[in-house]
Amino acid sequence: MKKIAIYPGTFDPITYGHIDVIKKALKLFDVVIIAASDTTNKSYLFNFDERIDIIKKALFYDLKFNKKKIHIISFSSLTTDLCKKYKSNIIIRGLRAVSDFEYEFQLAGMNRKLNSNIETIFLMSDLENQIISSRFVKEIIKLNGDIKKFTTKSTIKSLKDKYE
């Protein structure tokens, strides 16, 4: 039986921090489902379809990841419902700093209360990518800064197109 993990997030846009977490998850699981959230309680720079397209281009075009091991989907449900749908009992969450931990710890606890069969695994990106956040990447590009160290070529193009 394949071990499937769900990696939920907004990915607005995907960064090298996210990509580090994906690489590490791929070492642990047969399939990693990248689940882009489409909830209405957040304002996004990129709409739902754009984010999915950006993720696909970054992972499959820029980085040549194996399409058989990664599935990219969108969702607007509870993550626990997504796990049930895809027969996964693992949620992957990325941690950058201690400040992320409290929120992520509470989220993991709530998911565990919703479904006691689900485990949350925290993965950290490599040290050089721990400072990267989608919010900072958007701010830097908006102010005409260089973001080559933070995300892929196709993602940079999408960001530049959005701000032109």
Image (cartoon, helix red, strand yellow):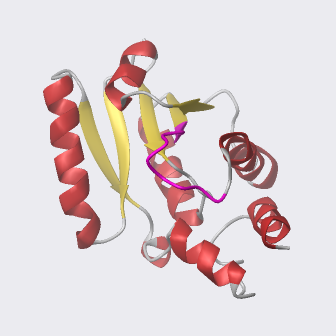
Q: Is residue 148 visible?
A: yes
Q: Position of residue 39 (x, y in %)?
A: 48, 40
Of residue 88 and residue 43, the one placed in the foreground of this image is 43
Asked if residue 39 is among those painted magenta in the image, a careful observer would answer: yes
Residue 150, compared with residue 76, is above or below; it is below
Of residue 13 and residue 59, the one placed in the foreground of this image is 13
Of residue 67 and residue 95, the one placed in the foreground of this image is 95
The residue at 78%/48% (across/down) is 57
Q: Position of residue 31 (x, y in %)?
A: 52, 28
Residue 27, compared with residue 30, is above or below; it is below
Q: Position of residue 105 (x, y in %)?
A: 18, 51
The C terminus lies in which quarter of the figure?
A: bottom right
Residue 103, compared with residue 162, is above or below; it is above
Q: Quadrant of residue 48?
A: top right
The residue at 45%/40% (across/down) is 7
Question: Magenta region's main secondary structure?
Answer: loop
Q: Quadrant of residue 83?
A: top left
The residue at 51%/64% (across/down) is 17
Left or right: 81 in relation to 67: left
The residue at 26%/39% (across/down) is 120
Query: Which residues fall within the magenta stretch?
Result: 35-45
Asked if residue 142 is among those painted magenta in the image, a careful observer would answer: no
Report how many numbered discs are placed on residues in the image.
Answer: 0
Residue 52, compared with residue 74, is above or below; it is below
Left or right: 98 in relation to 141: left
Q: Is residue 70 visible?
A: no
Q: Position of residue 129 (x, y in %)?
A: 49, 72
Q: Quadrant of residue 38?
A: top right
